[in-house]
Image: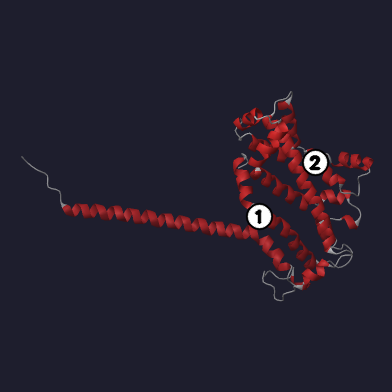
Amino acid sequence: MKTNVIDPTSWDDDARIARGIKLRQQATARRARLLKHVFLIAFSGIMLYPLLWLVASSLKPEDQIFGSLSLWPSEWRWDNYTQGWNALPLSFTVFYKNSAIVTVLSVIGNLLSCSFAAYAFARLQFTGKTLFFGLMMMTMMIPYHVVLIPQYVLFLNLGWVDTYLPLIVPRFLAADGFFVFLMVQFFRQIPRELDEAAMIDGCSPFKIYWAVILPLSLPAMATAAIFSLIWVWEDFLAPLIYLNDINSYTVPLALRLFVDQEGQSAFGQMFAMSVLSLVPVLLFFVAFQKLIIRGIATSGMK
């Protein structure tokens, strides 16, 4: 009987070959990760360059803002911030206060009205529910400029022009279909057994909304709040149309006053105030970042 004898040296050869293949695969994976990180860093630099240029320009002398490609200021002009704060006929504190009033009331109005409408579409049953939801979704496809003139005529007849009412009241009427849709998607994922258990305990639909749905919807509410804050705080067109008195100007309108069409424009001071105008939005986003990411991920918007 003939037996096969296995050469032990062949095991070492196979192990070396396998180890070589594994090392090559690891090297290829490292190169791929390195290239990916280089690409992401370069792409991030391109995306962040306008913001870095804005910050750098706010610290440069007037004659170096557009005359130099370097981001690093040759002369640090911190007084652009102090001079810009008091450069206009009114202190920038007034414009910050006006923007804060409009933004806070608008955010509260959006959260209340849009959550009410979303709760009705997501949890209640009523005649024409599908039709009304479809009409609401259609409003998201209508450009703002299409309804601009009819809205202005309406608010003019109501005597609301040159007040904050045209900027705030529509927010309390669920005028932003995007936020309604966002919350509907989130509310639909909440188990209906919670509603049934609350009804057995004697809760009304409003009590279910207030005590059950809202506490479980903090991520969606935070997402709607941050988007609403960004859009209202940075809105330029609506305040430009409805506000005529400088005492009522918001921050975007105040920034426009730094650019004089007939005289000299103070770009350094304007960029300094532009940097400060970003601070509230950044602080709000940092404070509620986790809730915002959870809200986008769990509401079907991802």
Distance, label 1 to label 2, CA atoms, is 25 Å
The front one of 201 and 15 is: 201
For label 2, the residue is 172
The front one of 208 and 64 is: 208
Q: Looking at the picture, how far across and down is residue 267, in whole percent?
A: 79, 66
Amino acid type at circle 1 is Ala
The front one of 117 and 246 is: 117
Q: Decide: marks 1, 2 in contact (CB < 8 A)?
A: no
Residue beneath the point at 86% across and 56% down: 249
Return the disc, 1 or 2, that comes first in the chain's sequence. Answer: 2
Residue positioned most to the top: 127
Does residue 176 appear in this view?
Answer: no
What is the crowding at mark 1: few (fewer than 14 residues within 10 Å), some, or many (at least 20)? few
Query: Height in image: 248 above or below 166?
Result: below
Residue beneath the point at 83% across and 59% down: 95
Q: Secondary structure at mark 2?
A: helix
Q: In the picture, residue 181 is in which quadrant?
A: top right
For label 1, the residue is 287
Q: Secondary structure at mark 1?
A: helix
Query: Height in image: 302 above or below 29?
Result: above
